[in-house]
Image (cartoon, helix red, strand yellow):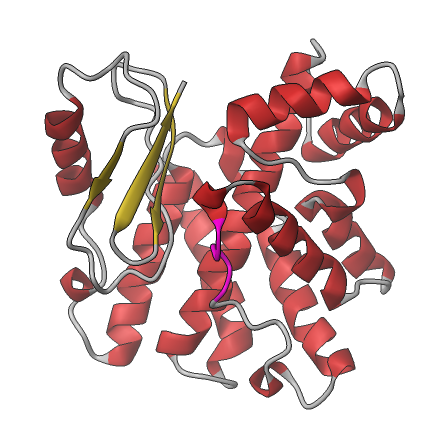
Amino acid sequence: MSDKRASTIYQVLWNSADILRSKMDATEYKNYLLGIIFYKYLSDTMLYHAAELLEEEPASLKEAQKIYTEAYNDPETREDLIDALMFDFYYTLEPQLTFTALVEEVHKGNFQLEDLAQGFRNIEQSSELYENLFEDVDLYSRKLGSGIQKQNQTIGEIMKELDTLDIAHEGDALGDAYEYLIGQFASASGKKAGEFYTPQPVSRLMTQIVLQGKEDKKGLAFMTPQWDLDHYYLMSKNLRMNLELLTFLDKSLILLLIT
């Protein structure tokens, strides 16, 4: 990723964090930013992959959303599309629950928190791999606002900021975003960043060592002593294998989906 692109991503992330800084400390708002960013990543990745399955080449997420919505609503293509997405990703989202669709409702002034909450539930319930993935994202916390209208507004503002990012097409952009945010959280809380995460080069080397000779095996799972990480993510597609998704779950379990 170019320095200019990285700078743009970091600015968007900083702006997103600014929305919450006056409402809660870093140990709390990290859950919102990391959770919503990951939801966007899952949504965007699904939309682009759906378009690929349909042999389409969208130039933007809005185009991918249109392609997905039409195919999802077409009885002739819907079932096969859902089956293919479940096989590849173990989750699907209804067209109206994608990040792209929800942020469009934000821009129109029609966004409802319950729709995002439903999207979270759909992913968590789609497979045991994602169980409780978003449990730390309390969309109805009074710290977001004194009522549902203010809570809608706060989350909507974060989503509008993140809407400018196309992290599904930026290689290690998600990992870079995650690492940047963790560094900011560590600084804000007065801790060393190393107490929150393992730097990407170290994680990548560890992954390569552990997976050496296991490139053709599917459904690998192993434990890691990452006690300070609540959930989230390390993405890598630069290994010499088709490693689609590597996520942190339940503070110590890494699930690798290798297809």
> In the displayed structure, does residue 209 sit left or right of residue 141?
left
Give the residues in magenta: 131-135
> In the displayed structure, does residue 200 sit left or right of residue 44?
left
The verdict on residue 237 being magenta is no
Instruction: Please state which of residues 80 and 112 is positioned toward the viewer in this rendering.
Output: 80
Judged by its main secondary structure, the magenta piece is loop
> In the displayed structure, does residue 189 sit left or right of residue 198?
right
Q: Residue at x 48, y 57 (%)?
A: 132
Instruction: Please state which of residues 19 and 129 is positioned toward the viewer in this rendering.
Output: 129
Instruction: Please state which of residues 113 and 258 is positioned toward the viewer in this rendering.
Output: 258
Visible residue check, residue 15? no
Q: Quadrant of residue 121?
A: bottom right
Q: Residue at x 54, y 32 (%)?
A: 90
Task: Give percent across and percent down for residue 240.
Answer: 25, 14
Q: Which image quarter is the N terminus in?
A: top left
Q: Above or below — where is 122 with respect to 117?
A: above
Q: Residue at x 28, y 17 (%)?
A: 217
